[in-house]
Image: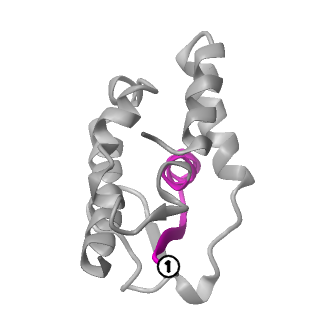
Amino acid sequence: MASEAFEEIVEDFEFLDDWEDRYRYVIDRGRAMEALDEALKVPATKVEGCASQVWLHPRIENGTFSFEGDSDAMIVRGLIAVLKALYNGTAVQEVPKIDAQAELARLGLNDHLSSQRSNGLRAMVERIRGVAAEAA
């Protein structure tokens, strides 16, 4: 089951009629997200496999997974915000069990992202799952 924050995004998407509105919604979520501290934009946090510059900084506190992230592309910042809604606040051992592809398919993202953006999204999910699996 997806988090409450992700379910809110799913509900919001149901009210938006076309992909342009949904695209703007994702970008707005990215704009609302706090920027990642420049000191955390280092090779260790950079996600390879993304067309844009992407950094993810995971944290595990008291067995709970969360991460911060940033990108130089607004749509990718929005995708990071969507992933934060999906994963943040989840028990670290549950993170690898989340079927991100199925959850994101509920938003129709698979049908409306370029292959490069889809590959980058997969790379972000793989990084998140890998960090959580390592910590669990």
Q: Secondary structure at mark 1?
A: strand
Q: Is residue 69 magenta?
A: yes
Kind of residue indicated by mark 1 = Arg
Q: Residue furthest top?
A: 17
State left or right for residue 37 relative to residue 97: right
Q: Residue 61, how many percent across, how many down?
A: 53, 81
Q: Residue 86, how many percent across, how many down?
A: 49, 48
Give the residue at x 59% y 16%.
14
Q: Is residue 15 magenta?
A: no
Q: Which residue is mark 1?
A: 59
Split into 4 quadrants, where in the image is the C terminus? bottom left
Q: Quadrant of residue 53?
A: bottom left
Question: Could you say which is closer to the camera, residue 76 or residue 94?
Answer: 94
Q: Residue 119, how many percent across, how many down?
A: 26, 48
Q: Is residue 49 above or below residue 65?
A: above
Residue bounds of the magenta highlight: 63-84
Q: Is residue 50 visible?
A: no
State left or right for residue 14 relative to residue 90: right
How is colour applied across the structure in the image?
one colour
Give the residue at x 70% y 41%.
28
